[in-house]
Amino acid sequence: MKSKVSTLIISLAMILLLWEIGSLVINRYFLPSPAVSLATAAKLLTEGTIWPHILASFRRITIGTALGLLAALPVGICMGRFKAADELLGAFFRFIYPVPKVVFMPIVVVLLGIGDTAKIFLIFLAIFFQITIIIRDSTASLGQEENDVMVSMKAGPVNILRHLILPGILPGILTALKTSLGISVALLMITELFASTSGLGYYIMNSMDSRNYPEMYAGIVILAMMSAGMYGFLELLEVRLCRWYYA
Amino acid sequence: MKSKKMCNKEIILEVKDLSFGYSASQGQVLRNVNVSVARGDCLSILGESGSGKTTLLKMMCGLLKADSGNVIFEGKVLNGPDERISIMFQNYGLLPWKTVRQNVLLPLQIRGEKPDPEKVAELLRYLGLEEHADKYPGALSGGQKQRCALGRAVMSRSQLILMDEPFSALDIRNRGKLQAFIRQFLKDMDMSCVMVTHSVEEALTMGDEVVIFDAGEGRITQTFEGMRGREEEIGSDLYYHQLRSIQDILNREMS
């Protein structure tokens, strides 16, 4: 734990140092020093003007992810457990999975408009396809012996789900959520660029358009902090819920 | 040789004319298998690895359905899993995300019953797992895992336990100790047992009766009396004679 904290401090210090050097070398107007940017971020946070944007982005990303996970669970488990389901849906997934979901944005916007629903739906789409595959593979790789033991104890589907499948696939799900966080944030950013009046993506681009570079960098810092915070939360969940996996 | 079973012992499990094949192309793994276990006895099934012994065990606990023939448990035809029959696989089938205590209590959880904490503590003490109760299986030795699986069978209130190669995954130095433990365990818990193994020595020392499963014929070909309950004779001339004659039969079958 201690070494983890110290490596975190060292890497943060390195980022700040590179940033500082960059701002000294490049024109300060386009690249304000970290001190200026962080001070602006602190000011935005304490004055409260940026909070509605943070909350708007946070809401979109958490709802989209939660819905994606909820939809992926039954589909992924069925595909992992029943060959017929995998054969039925496998081809569809193989076709859609590698396509970056951002290409569906025009379709989503045409069908769902430019409001929150469309933004959340796009994140949902990306998470759903990503996580379903992981859940399918984790479910399929659960041990046959463990399953047979459960069946021999006359465990029904509910007990098998509760004691065998869900705990068994949890580490895979948390890892997948962590790795897809970057995709979700990227999608969030892109969706917030279009016809938005809220969200960190909008805030950053708006600051850029109005040449308010300290605020633009402050927005980027805050978005990075939000992503890092969510990543940290998932790691914490992993440590708390999957102790057996790391023991 | 006359087996003890003939002395009018009650039969707990009987396999009658059992045949089974996984698919038509692979042919039958089991062909008209007939065997029975007396209550309180331990039956050793001896055969080479991959000969279909595990398949036979899975049918004995209702995990697999026979193509023809029956498994009769306590006088009734077995139509699927029964909590009175436990199966212990080679790697014990413990759930890695549950602690030793949770694994042992799993049968109760499945049945929706509340455990009696004193009884559980007593069982864990008996199994020598008291100190390890809150550990995950990944942190246990092979012997401890095995005892955890035995505890689970006790909580299942099993009357018959089926063991698939129970000692093959264990350190050779500890085998003797664990064999003695299982012998005592079966007696203390009043459980009958079917054990599948490829080791003649194990089959002979653990079993009241030893049968040979011939993979080529897909059925049980020979029956011998085991040494269980006569452990003092292990190492005697009679024991070695028995060991050699069984080994000879196995060698002949394999060639």
Image: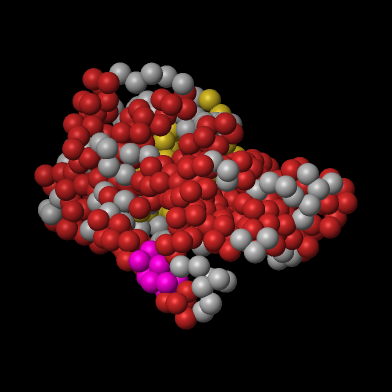
Magenta segment boundaries in residue numbering: A12-20
* Up-down relation of residue A53 to residue B154 (above or below): below
Magenta stretch: includes residue A14: yes
Q: Which residue is most to the right?
A: A110
Report x, y in % for residue A58: 59, 44
Report x, y in % for residue B18: 56, 44
Residue B86 or residue A226, whichever sits in front = A226
Quarter of the image holding residue B12? top left
Answer yes or no: is residue B252 visible: no
Q: Chief secondary structure of the magenta span?
A: helix
Image quadrant for the N terminus of chain A? bottom left
Q: What colour scheme governs how the chains and residues are painted in the rendered image of this protein?
A: secondary structure
Residue A36 or residue A1, whichever sits in front = A36
Quarter of the image holding residue A134? bottom right
Residue B81 or residue A237, whichever sits in front = A237
Q: Which residue is most to the bottom?
A: A25
Q: Is residue B46 left or right of residue A221?
A: left
The residue at the point 18 percent across, 54 percent down is B174
The residue at the point 50 percent across, 45 percent down is A45
Answer yes or no: is residue A48 visible: yes
* Up-down relation of residue B86 to residue A144 (above or below): above
Report x, y in % for residue B195: 36, 45
The residue at the point 31 percent across, 51 percent down is A247
* Up-down relation of residue B169 to residue B224 (above or below): below
Q: Is residue B66 left or right of residue B103?
A: right
